[in-house]
Image (cartoon, rainbow, N blue to C red):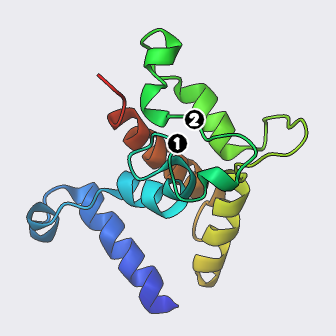
């Protein structure tokens, strides 16, 4: 577990420093990794709502590449943050999309439980959501 934490901190440090030789040699797209890990199964690897689990859902997942176009040319970052976080979005009937904010909070607590209060769980959840939103903003149709 300590090795996993150390590796995570090392990667985060390299990404944030920008000057690290290894970071220059191999770019890590954290937003893409987050998307492929948690969103692509429903929204598709290309974000068009055609993931392998899409047919199992009551409603087809939205095409995430059209969010800006469908919002008069403005990327709806605040609304997307609320939907992904999920805690402030009222649900009517079933909600096919997981409440990622809660899921991220549980994952972060499990990964960093040895840190004993040396991390800010809400900040870690916000960071993961913002990294994901930055990636989704990059896949918008032009």
> Which mark, residue 49?
1
Residue at 86 percent of width and 38 percent of height: 91
Residue 27 vertical placement versus 78 (above, below): below
- In the picture of the structure, the residue carrying the numbered disc 2 is 62
Q: Residue furthest top?
A: 72
Seen in the image, is 22 located left or right of residue 69? left
- Name the disc covering residue 124, or none: none
Mark 1 → mark 2, Cα distance in angstroms = 5 Å
Q: In front here: 8 or 132? A: 132
Res. 141 in view: yes
* Residue at point 10%, 61% (across, down): 24
Q: Quadrant of residue 60?
A: top right
Q: In which quarter of the image is the C terminus?
A: top left
SS assignment at label 1: loop
Circle 2 SS class: loop
Location of residue 27 with respect to 61 vertically, above or below: below
């Amino acid at each position: 577990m300590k090795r996993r934490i150390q590796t995570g901190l090392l990667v985060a440090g390299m990404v944030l420093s920008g000057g690290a030789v290894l970071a220059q040699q191999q770019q890590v797209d954290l937003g893409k990794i987050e998307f492929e890990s948690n969103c692509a199964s429903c929204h598709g690897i290309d974000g068009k709502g055609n993931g392998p689990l899409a047919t199992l859902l009551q409603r087809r997942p939205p095409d995430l590449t059209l969010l800006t176009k469908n919002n008069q040319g403005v990327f709806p970052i605040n609304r997307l943050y609320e939907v992904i976080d999920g805690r402030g979005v009222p649900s009517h009937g079933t909600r096919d999309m997981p409440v990622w904010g809660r899921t991220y909070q549980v994952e972060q607590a499990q990964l960093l439980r040895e840190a004993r209060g040396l991390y800010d769980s809400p900040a870690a959840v916000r960071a993961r959501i913002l990294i994901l939103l930055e990636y989704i903003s990059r896949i918008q149709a032009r």
